[in-house]
């Protein structure tokens, strides 16, 4: 069984209790469109298991991060932006401007992302 | 044996042929300070194996992405910025503004990172 939390908004999306525009889901991750997009394509890829963020990933959960990257690649091919490229962003804590305390990577595409990244 | 490329700048750093300010290295990844930092802490975490970027990661190499995340956490604790937080960024192709065609994650910390991330 996957460990989820009752009141976490991303856990609720993973469980289908809150509707989302889901673009990809497998055993490990769920991906859906960000409700406040910052690029023509802005998708959140979240772990199905509740983890607090990047820093909450211990060795046993590290494969989930690999699954997030594989999901990003599959989505990029599926939605047709693989050739043009994309950016993956994960935020931890205050300085990272983390918004939800559940591990998620932002997948941004459809325009050239500038530098620095925030 | 790790697969590296003769002329790739990050492969040369991994092999120690080009000096870098290395902060962490293990069997899977090498981390060193970015030479053009965009935050008080700006470290690159690269795969020791030559992979073209996020999109070059196939299923067999996905565990390397997990190792990159674990390395980020270890570095954050080692350098004392875990509590304040950080941002992880990986760029793919033109729209991602990828600069070097070798898989690397930017680890930024030491200031509050803005939004959007580029």
Image (tube, coloured by chain):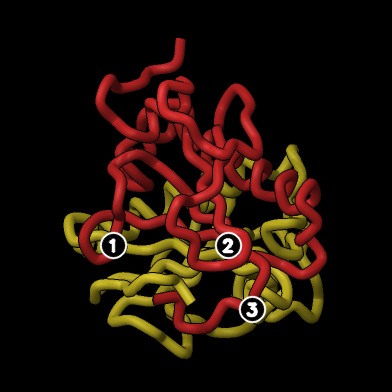
Chain colours: A red, B yellow
Q: Find disc 3 in the rendering and name its residue.
A: A112
- Tag 1 residue: A97
Q: Is A7 above or below relative to A113?
A: above
Q: Is A14 left or right of A69, judged from the image as shown? A: left
Residue A108 disc label: 2
Question: Residue at position x 67%, y 58% from top?
Answer: B54
Instruction: Please indicate whether residue B64 sits to the left or right of residue B34 in the image.
Output: right
**Residue positioned most to the bottom:** B36
User: What residue appears at the point 45 percent right and 76 percent down from the top-left corner?
Assistant: A117
Q: Secondary structure at mark 1?
A: loop
How far from the left and from the top, in percent, is residue A17?
42, 21
Residue farthest top in this picture = A1
Q: CA distance from mark 1 to mark 2?
A: 16 Å
Residue A20 on image: x %, y %: 51, 36
Q: Residue at x 72, y 72 (%)?
A: B93
Counting residues from the N terminus, which is met first, the one under dot 3 or under dot 1?
A: 1
Residue B54 located left or right of residue A9: right
């Amino acid at each position: 069984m996957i460990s989820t939390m009752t009141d976490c908004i991303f856990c609720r999306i993973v469980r289908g209790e809150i509707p989302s525009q889901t673009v990809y889901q497998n055993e490990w991750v769920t991906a859906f469109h960000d409700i406040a997009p910052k690029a023509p394509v802005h998708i959140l890829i979240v772990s199905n298991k509740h983890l607090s963020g990047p820093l909450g990933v211990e060795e046993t959960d590290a494969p989930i991060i690999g699954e997030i990257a594989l999901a990003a690649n599959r989505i990029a091919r599926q939605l047709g932006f693989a050739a043009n490229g994309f950016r993956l962003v994960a935020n931890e804590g205050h300085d990272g401007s983390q918004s939800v305390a559940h591990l998620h990577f932002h997948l941004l595409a459809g325009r050239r992302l500038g530098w620095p990244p925030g």
